[in-house]
Amino acid sequence: MLTARTYSVTIARNWRELYEAIWQPEIFPKWASGLTEADLRRGGTGWIADGPDGPIVVRFTPHNEFGVMDHFVETGDGREVHVPLRVIENGDGAEVMLTLFRQPGMSDEDFARDAKWITRDLRALRDYAKALG
């Protein structure tokens, strides 16, 4: 069992409208700093991005009615990391929640670094959603 932390951001937009605006893999680079539009490209069984140690493969869940935006990252060393991501209703707005799992062998510093990265990306998503109008 892995240690897990869930981070969230509240966005003043109907949750279904928000999900429809951001669920496509092509949109992730607009707010997820680990991906860039130039790097993310279709390939094989998913999408390919350039990671710090070479190419990584990212698989995204298909469009659905539940606001699930999970993705699975093949790290290049044979491991696949599950990244649960949800858009849920929060009154007349939305809550976007991402769960970070501490991977085996991950140091306290690396876990804290990833948590800060997620927080920054969720804020960027909130800003992106505001810009959508």
Image (cartoon, rainbow, N blue to C red):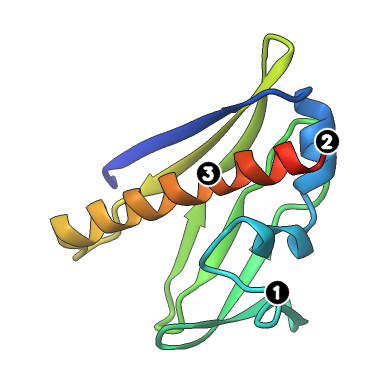
| Residue type pointed to by label 1 | Glu
Q: Depth check: 66 or 123 in front?
A: 123
How crowded pointer 1 is (Cα within 10 Å; few <14, some 14-19, many 20+) is rated as few
Side (left or right) of 132 relative to 50: right
Q: Vertical placement of 35 versus 5: above or below?
A: below
Residue 79 is situated, as x and y percent measured from the top left of the image, at 42, 72
Q: Depth check: 103 or 8 in front?
A: 8
| Residue type pointed to by label 2 | Gly
The residue sitting at 69% across, 46% down in the picture is 128
Residue 37 is situated, as x and y percent measured from the top left of the image, at 70, 74
Alpha carbon separation for disc pair 3 and 2: 17 Å
Side (left or right) of 87 relative to 9: right
Contact, mark 1 vs mark 3 (Cβ under 8 Å): no
User: What residue is pinned by disc 1?
Assistant: 37
User: What residue is pinned by disc 3?
Assistant: 122
How crowded pointer 3 is (Cα within 10 Å; few <14, some 14-19, many 20+) is rated as many
Residue 44 is situated, as x and y percent measured from the top left of the image, at 74, 83
The residue sitting at 52% across, 31% down in the picture is 9
- The kind of secondary structure element at disc 1 is loop
**Residue 133, labelled with which disc?**
2
